[in-house]
């Protein structure tokens, strides 16, 4: 049993060591470091995850807005200051916060939730070109 445990820990340790010390970011972003771009834009690419988690929080009674502010708001505080990518992330945070307020206000009204989700989709669609101008390439199946 010990041998199996030890053999499973070794590859995980090697992977963690490699990830911490040898990962490389995409070069050549305009007006920002590519590392900050790689920190910020995956949040936007994963907006459906945050949307689902916020809806789950609203269903549990803790509120969608509280979830968005707690998770994405904390991420915004941990970002490096300045740069176009940070401005795009702050727009994303405002979009998600506005959507979550509508969810909390109209949680029982399905029609209002559908309208809020359509507006969220439209707002995200307006952010995508800004991200791509800054060098981010969205995966084909990111939606």
Image (cartoon, rainbow, N blue to C red):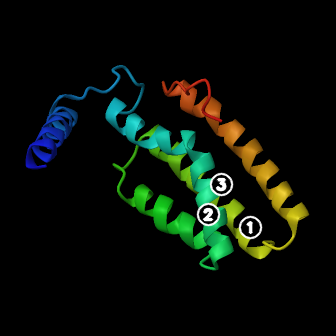
Mark closer to the chain start, 1 or 3: 3
Disc 3 to disc 2, how far (Cα)? 13 Å
Image location (x, y in percent) of residue 97: 63, 62
Task: Tell me if mark 3 has few (under 14), some (14-19) or many (20+) residues whose alpha carbon lies within 10 angstroms of its own.
Answer: some
Marks 1 and 3 sit apart, C-alpha to C-alpha, by 12 Å
Numbered mark located on residue 54 in the image: 2
x and y percent of residue 98 in the render? 69, 62
Q: Of all residues shown, which one is farthest toward the bottom?
A: 61
Disc number for residue 103: 1
Relative to 24, is 84 on the left or the right? right
Q: Nearer the viewer, residue 8 or 113?
A: 8
Q: In the image shown, does 131 or 141 lie closer to the viewer?
A: 141
Residue 94 visible in the picture:
no
Mark whose residue sits in front, 3 or 2: 2
Q: Which residue is mark 3?
A: 95
User: Residue at the spot x=13%, y=49% of the render?
Assistant: 1
Q: Residue at x 9, y 49 (%)?
A: 2
Q: Is residue 49 above or below residue 17?
A: below
The kind of secondary structure element at disc 2 is helix
Dot 1: few (<14), some (14–19), or many (≥20) neighbours within 10 Å? many
Residue at 51% of width from left, 47% of height from top? 89
Q: 135 above or below 128?
A: above
Q: Position of residue 134 (x, y in %)?
A: 50, 28
Q: Secondary structure at mark 3?
A: helix
Name the foreground residue: 48 vs 32: 48
């Amino acid at each position: 049993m010990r041998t199996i445990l030890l053999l499973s820990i070794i590859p995980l340790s090697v992977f963690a060591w490699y990830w911490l010390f040898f990962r490389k970011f995409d070069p050549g972003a305009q007006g920002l470091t590519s590392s900050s771009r790689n920190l910020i834009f995956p949040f936007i690419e994963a907006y459906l995850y945050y949307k689902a988690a916020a809806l789950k929080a609203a269903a549990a009674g803790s509120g969608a807005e509280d979830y968005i502010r707690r998770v994405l708001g904390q991420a915004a505080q941990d970002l490096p200051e300045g740069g176009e990518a940070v401005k795009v992330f702050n727009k994303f945070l405002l979009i998600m916060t506005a959507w979550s307020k509508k969810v909390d206000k109209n949680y029982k009204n399905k029609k209002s939730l559908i309208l809020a989700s359509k507006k969220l989709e439209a707002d995200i669609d307006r952010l995508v070109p800004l991200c791509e101008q800054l060098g981010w390439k969205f995966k084909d199946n990111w939606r």
